[in-house]
Amino acid sequence: MKYINESKINYLLKTEADEKDIDIILSKTKELKRLSLEESAKLLSVKNSAVLQKIYAAASYVKNIIYGKRVVLFIPMYISNFCVNSCLYCGFASNNKVTLRKKLTFNEIKEQTKILLKRGHKRILMVAGEMASSKDNIDYYVGAVEAIYNAEYKGNKIKRVNINVAPMDVESFKKLKKAGIGTYQIFQETYHEATYRKLHISGAKTDPDNRLDAIDNAFEAGIDDVGIGPLLGLCNPKFEILALLMHIEHLEKTYGVGPHTISVPRIEPAPGSSYADKPEHPIADEDFKKIVAVLRLSVPYTGIIMSTRETAKLRDVLVNLGVSQISAESKVTPGGYEEDSARNDKLDRQFNVNDQRTLNEIVHSLLLQGFMPSFCAACYRKKRTGGHFMDLAKPGEIRRMCDINALVTLKEYLEDFATPEVKELGYQLIEGRKAKLDNASISMLEKLFTNIDNGVRDEYV
Ligand code: SAM
Ligand code: SF4
């Protein structure tokens, strides 16, 4: 597989480190420095629980310094589960006869978006299976993105549409950029070539290099926020993480900037997939926690996304260790959002979802832990993306703007969508956070808050 030097990774997998080595690496992370592959391999090799606790503490420190208490919230929207590929682990695989298929019309996409707006969502990750013709794919994706942005509920609109769809050529990515997408996200699934070829048995996805090229094509089309990740459970997780970091090195070298986000989806049972019921490399929660912490330390400025594949309990732990964005009340099926949320998706979902909490319940839980739920999309709208975002992020300058924007979007959510209990808790948190800001930030925040009280929405700095 391109850019992935398997023999180097296999060599690194034999790395061992004693506590002294780990202490030296952790002191480097305190300066928020990016780690080398060798250093990440050493951290991944740790088994001793006392040393692991040190890694967790360091990850939590880095998360806090760079991201503060903010956690960005989003929701996936599945628009079609037709697919030409046969990924052995996926409920949408073309050879899966169990799954009920549906491709939403643009009008249905708009209606789904309105339901999400009504619950307070502002950021959508649009997801689809792959169609046979690349022209059909791109025309449908562009129309769907436009339908989402056009939907409106009582003056509320979606601020940012990210997408997770099949690879495309540069021209198609240019069309998506014009349609206003935020991040283009695509998971390599596994960076281990033999495993990749074994699990992707038909359709365009059989070629692993074509999948890697998608990220390069997106960059070349001017989309500088990209999201990558492995599907954990298919191969040795340490191999996957080192290969992911190698992929990031390639992107940094070629485009001067790495991915905007990393996702760490763990395989879940899927309707009609015996593979997904019994993946070859299941990962224990403790190893998963270590992976998240090591990623936080290895690439401190890259966002980490955690989906509802994970349980509420584990997600609550992982936001402390490095996760910066989480999804909420996800339905992994086209048309899955309904007013009463009682729909049975047993036969058309992609995989099992473990965190079933509503957005209000997740906001509640974040507030109880002292986190600031954020619905902000200001960087993307102000073109603070790619290398420009990293330049601001690295000196920590973005933090001040982010804190203000997070508090503004939180107040809007509390006013328009929260239950009374969440509203009260939210205002307590706002007061506490406000007290930590400098005078200039406080007066800016107060001005924006007064505007919200007077009915103004969607202001940001
Ligand atoms: N069809 C496009 C593709 O494969 O890139 C995009 C959408 S696909 C629905 C999104 C992701 O879901 C896949 O990249 C894969 O990592 C993940 N996925 C598939 N089956 C899964 C399973 N059983 N459990 C957890 N995640 C799964
Ligand atoms: Fe299709 Fe994506 Fe599922 Fe593979 S993972 S079968 S490409 S929807």
Image (cartoon, helix red, strand yellow):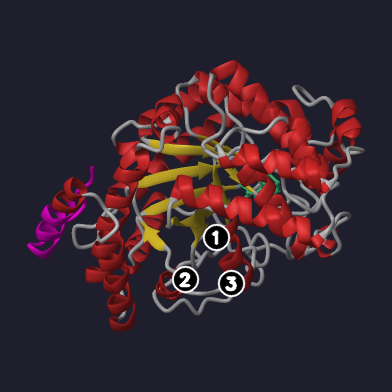
Q: Amino acid at mark 1?
A: Val
Residue at mark 2: 369
Label 2 near ligand 1 (CB < 8 Å): no
Q: Are marks 2 and 3 in contact (CB under 8 Å)?
A: no
Label 3 near ligand 1 (CB < 8 Å): no
Q: Earlier in the sequence, mark 1 or mark 3?
A: 3
Q: Are marks 2 and 1 in contact (CB under 8 Å)?
A: yes
Please tell me in which quadrant of the rendered image residue 108 appears.
Answer: bottom left
Quarter of the image where the C terminus is located = top left
Instruction: Depth check: give the residue in front, 106 or 60.
Output: 60
Q: CA distance from mark 1 to mark 3?
A: 11 Å
Residue 130 in view, yes or no: no
Q: Secondary structure at mark 2?
A: loop
Q: Find residue 97 and report its horizontal and vertical position in percent.
A: 76, 60
Residue at mark 3: 312
Which residue is depicted at the point 87% across and 40% down? 195
Q: Is residue 390 magenta?
A: no
- Residue 101 relative to residue 460: left or right: right
